[in-house]
Amino acid sequence: MRAAIILALFATAASQPATPPKKLTPTDIVAAAPASAWRAIPAEDLMVMTLEGGGRVVVQLAPAFAPVHVSNIRKMATGGYWQDANVYRVQDNYVAQWGIGDVKRDFPAGVVALPPHEYWRSPAGLRITPLGWPDVYASSAGFSGGWPVALYKDGTASLTHCYGAVGVARDLHPDTGTGGELYAIIGHAPRQLDRNIAVVGRVIDGIQHLSALPRGSETMGFYKEGTVARPITSVTLASEMPEAERPSFEYLDESSPSFAAYLRSRANRDDDFYRVAAGGVDLCNAPVPVRPTPEEKG
Amino acid sequence: MRAAIILALFATAASQPATPPKKLTPTDIVAAAPASAWRAIPAEDLMVMTLEGGGRVVVQLAPAFAPVHVSNIRKMATGGYWQDANVYRVQDNYVAQWGIGDVKRDFPAGVVALPPHEYWRSPAGLRITPLGWPDVYASSAGFSGGWPVALYKDGTASLTHCYGAVGVARDLHPDTGTGGELYAIIGHAPRQLDRNIAVVGRVIDGIQHLSALPRGSETMGFYKEGTVARPITSVTLASEMPEAERPSFEYLDESSPSFAAYLRSRANRDDDFYRVAAGGVDLCNAPVPVRPTPEEKG
């Protein structure tokens, strides 16, 4: 019975002789994408965080959308700002948040203490691949440089709070946060936060080390004073690590035929498990595929 | 600094003298809803599950949408079918799944071994409160009897795979599953599953006991053979429990003015934290509020 259930929620059909070829799942399409459809993510855009007890979280930074906050984060990561940092808030279906919390510590040199808001930018210079379906939070939605993006009628563009998005915790506006306290989305996309917070990246590996942490018992998922969800052992950038140890990732170029096929498939599941295809998909239910850079073939 | 961060992601503004009254958050609106806006959930619609080590999960069943599967589930819950059941699959941003897996066990009397699909129903007899914004997976979306519902151009209606939705794991169609193996959604709504699986309810309390479980290491989040995420100690219906021990819940009637205000507020956050209101909300980002039934005032 277990074998049957293993099939239950994904469409990995057993091949049957004398039937048409198996229809492809989104996973199949991504697995078959040629090397030319993948784009390397620069090592200086990868923030690598390790949690006590093991567990590595890799955040892809988004300098094209939040340059000042990302610059701050890079300086904090390399300047020791997050020594003794920890995850101190885990709110179900919402966020895991980390940083140094109460601790007062000087910023490393070059950190901008009061950054501009960076909640949105001009779409000028962004090549946008449209989602192809409406977005209730914006005029339209699509993908650009590996990011899920919303476009607004006032002519602005923003990153979106999809699952895994990393944003800058802040106090009431006009405060914009420094980047010293960050959160990752661990539930259904709270898109109302778009254009209200600086989104600085997304978790591309190890999100389960944040999303599976016990929820905090206090209001908004905070941990009781003196307790934390998990200490953070180290934070650095991949570009600062010895080359042999660096994690390396690439994303599926949204302008590639493979991405177009993936998106069509996410919106029209017709593999053997499915009886009815939805005929649509929302932005956050079509995450840009990311994979570890394959080993070079010798 | 921690105090400031506690404010960061919700809009609980410190009151300032000589300023206009604080704008209401969705939480404020729900807290202020009069008793008349709340509807009791019948005790026979509450499946109560306890996990080893503590942790109670309460699932509201949806007999109006999946009557045969719900009847099966009630008989399994009261007939000892789930003895030695466990959570054996936890896939990040997707589902936690439980049941008896490999174990072969006769069904309690009255269980329908091959139920009809119950993936959708006629909307006849359903009073629908429209969401008011488009839904990319259906012709329209709204709420009915405490449930998030999608309506299709072929004249059908279905429950939706929002966060917390509970569905019936199954093999490839035309199998529909019995209800013996269930899953709960623990990530961004995988709405492609709508009309492809019998949705039988939703977790209304204790979802964190499923969503914070360690993710399984095998394909699709399954646990390695011989290991499980968490044993299930007991499953019953609230209606079978001694009255003094029964959990009791009510939901905010979607036809009430309070619900209308809640929905408007979810779509147009204008409390002090926010700088820009979205002007829209998707179905699964406006969960129907549920609360424990308040103690009667003496």
Image (tube, coloured by chain):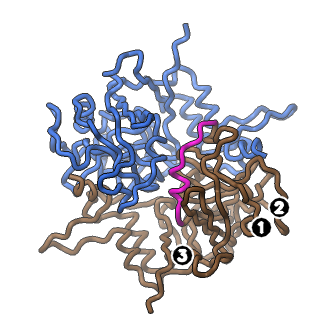
Chain colours: A brown, B blue
- The answer to whether B56 is drawn above or below residue B281 in the figure is above
Decide which of A42, A238 is in the foreground and name it: A238
* Residue A198 at x, y percent in the picture: 70, 59
Of all chains, the one bearing label 1 is: A
Label 1 Cα crowd, 10 Å radius (few <14 / some 14-19 / many 20+): some
- Residue lying furthest left in this view? A18
Mark nearer the N terminus (3 vs 1): 1
Decide which of A297, B247 is in the foreground and name it: A297
Magenta residues, dominant SS class? loop
**Disc 3 secondary structure class:** strand
Type of residue at label 1?
Gly
Residue at image mark 2? A107
Does the rendering let one see residue A172? no
Mark on residue A249? 3
Mark on residue A79? 1
Residue A82 among those drawn in magenta? no
- The Cα–Cα distance between marks 2 and 3, rounded to whole angstroms, is 29 Å
Rendered image quadrant of residue A266: bottom left
* Residue found 68% across the figure and 56% down from its top: A182
* Residue A146 at x, y percent in the picture: 56, 72
- The answer to whether B85 is drawn above or below residue B93 in the figure is above
Tags 3 and 1 in contact by the CB under 8 Å rule? no
Type of residue at label 2?
Phe
- Residue lying furthest front in this view? A53
**Disc 1 secondary structure class:** loop
* Residue B36 at x, y percent in the picture: 51, 20
Quadrant location of the C terminus of chain B in the rendered image: top right
2 vs 1, front mark: 1
Of all chains, the one bearing label 2 is: A
Is A297 situated left or right of A223 in this image? left
Magenta range? A205-218
